[in-house]
Image (cartoon, rainbow, N blue to C red):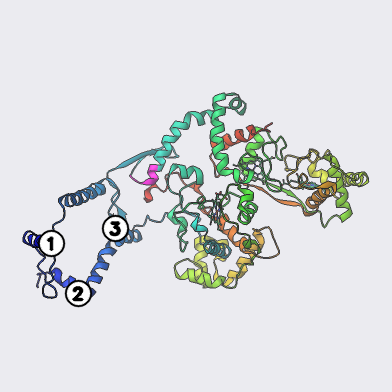
Amino acid sequence: MNLNFKHEWIETNIGLMAVLTMLAISVGGLVEIAPLFFIDKTVEKVEGVRPYTPLEQRGRDIYIREGCYTCHSQMIRPFRDEKLRYGHYSLAAESQYDHPFQWGSKRTGPDLARVGGKYSNQWQVQHLVAPRSMVPESVMPNYPWLLTTKLDISDTAARMKALRKVGVPYSLTQAELDANIEKFGETVAKQLHIPDAQKNLVEQANFGNYDGDRSGISEMDALVAYLQVLGTMVDFSKYADDAFVGNR
Amino acid sequence: MSEQKLQSQTVQTTGHAWDGDLQEYNNPLPVWWVYTFYATVIFSIVYWVIYPSWPIGKDWIGGMSKITYVNSEGETKTHSWNTRALLLQDLNKAAAEQKPYFDKVSGMSYAQIAQDPEMNAFILSAGRALFADNCAPCHQAGGQGVVGFFPNLTDDDWLYGGSYDEIHQTLMIGRRGYMPAFGEVLNGDQIDQLANYVAKLSGSGHDAAKAAAGDALFHSETAACFYCHGDDAKGRKDLGAPNLTDNIWLWADVPGASGDEGKIAAIRGVIAGGLNKGVMPAWAGRLSPEQIKVLTVYVHELGGGQ
């Protein structure tokens, strides 16, 4: 075997150079990211985390459409000031069904990872329509159209199918539904069944009446349903305060 | 030209020649750069040894640096360095600094806290921060509330009571006021009569005849207002039903309405539509018992504590 390696081979062969450059720069990423797929502690084992219901998922779509993430993060870091202001630090497990996750890094407004349940639906609606009527010094834009725009629910099932393709356990078949019942319990599992997507969405919106207007399902219904579930799935009172230290 | 020649004598070329005569100098890297590079390599090795680094199978090397903290069960634990353990250690430290105060807060009765100037100062500063983060978005920075949405906490009119224990209970379990809608049970005249009666109770302009009919209705089984608001219409704290005689309004925007007819219309709106939107969230799961106690005293001190 001829080990007489020469730089000239690479420098005179642009194709080879491109391939080798690519290999060299991907090492950094591979070394940092790949092990996370093998280390079984990356995602904490906690109870309660489930995929979003169809209504919440549509709310999340609106959250992304309106660019709320340009001002709000959803990632509470393990620092004292953040714990005091926002609550328990975010777990990897809590965003395991988020595609794409909304961790973000820009905080013009507060972090929203645990905003669920902090305010009433009525406050959320009023605050989205006219933030300064609730918080006089706010710089958040008004979103009045959310209340007047009817939620488009025609493609709910298609959106869930797309998420299913990237690994969110929404069920299509009876077998998948059974598996979800095993995993999430019957009430939740039924919400995640794609063939019933529209029915489930309408039921939750009518029951929750998030926007305070029963005459129809607005985009506000969906967005508030989403905001109200953020950070509420894990019951941290069931875990010691150092239960997740070993995961890092 | 001459300079270039000079250089070509001292600096070697890489040895390649392109297009016949195109050559490349091989200048060595500056010495300081090379040594800095070696230093970073050594630094990284030291870093690997001290901090968590290489993955091994399903686990990783934790590193030599350790963090000791006391967990919520009171056990002292040591863990290899990570930000979550660091947070607990940091919280332990902060708790130790604030402990004298929080111990005092949990150990003292409300009355004792109120009389202790040092504790008062602590409540004021700790309470103000807590209130700004959690309560001000609804009750506003000064606690003055918003008519139609959130009650004023600075006056001495209370839906659920203004004693320490009642405020504490409000914060722990949250509140949700409910009054049925009478729009379909009663006819327009009856609602108008009731509204005139309520206006009379609080000293606003009203039609005396209608108010008298409203008085009877208020205390009748048909409308049954007295059941929640009390025979004297002074409210029932267990239900959060407000005192209707004090001219302090939360839902019916009486102060904002113009003229007697406007005020009565505002009251009619509440009676016909009912109320089911006053939601005060529960804080027991969100804030610690000490934080809630601090807030209880803070709200009590806002002005109207009883």
Q: In screen coordinates, is B250 left or right of B11?
A: right
Q: Nearer the viewer, residue A196 or A55?
A: A55
Residue A13 is tagged as 2
Q: Earlier in the sequence, mark 3 or mark 1?
A: 1
Q: Position of residue B107 (x, y in %)?
A: 54, 28
Chain letter for the residue marked with disc 2 in the picture: A
- Residue indicated by mark 3: B57
Report the quarter where the C terminus of chain B lies: top right
Callout 2–callout 1 Cβ contact below 8 Å: no
User: Rounded to the nearest whole Å, what is the CA distance between mark 2 and mark 1?
Assistant: 21 Å
Amino acid type of the residue tagged 1 in the rendering:
Asn
At a point 56% along the width and 37% down the height, the residue shown is B128
Q: Nearer the viewer, residue B9 or B144?
A: B9
- Residue indicated by mark 1: B26
User: Rounded to the nearest whole Å, what is the CA distance between mark 3 and mark 1?
Assistant: 43 Å
Q: Position of residue B115 (x, y in %)?
A: 60, 24
> Dot 2: within a 10 Å radius of its alpha carbon, few (fewer than 14), some, or many (20 or more) residues?
few
Which residue reaches farthest front?
B1
Chain letter for the residue marked with disc 3 in the picture: B
Chain letter for the residue marked with disc 1 in the picture: B
Instruction: Specify start and end residues of the magenta stretch as a single range.
Output: B81-86
Residue B85 is tagged as none
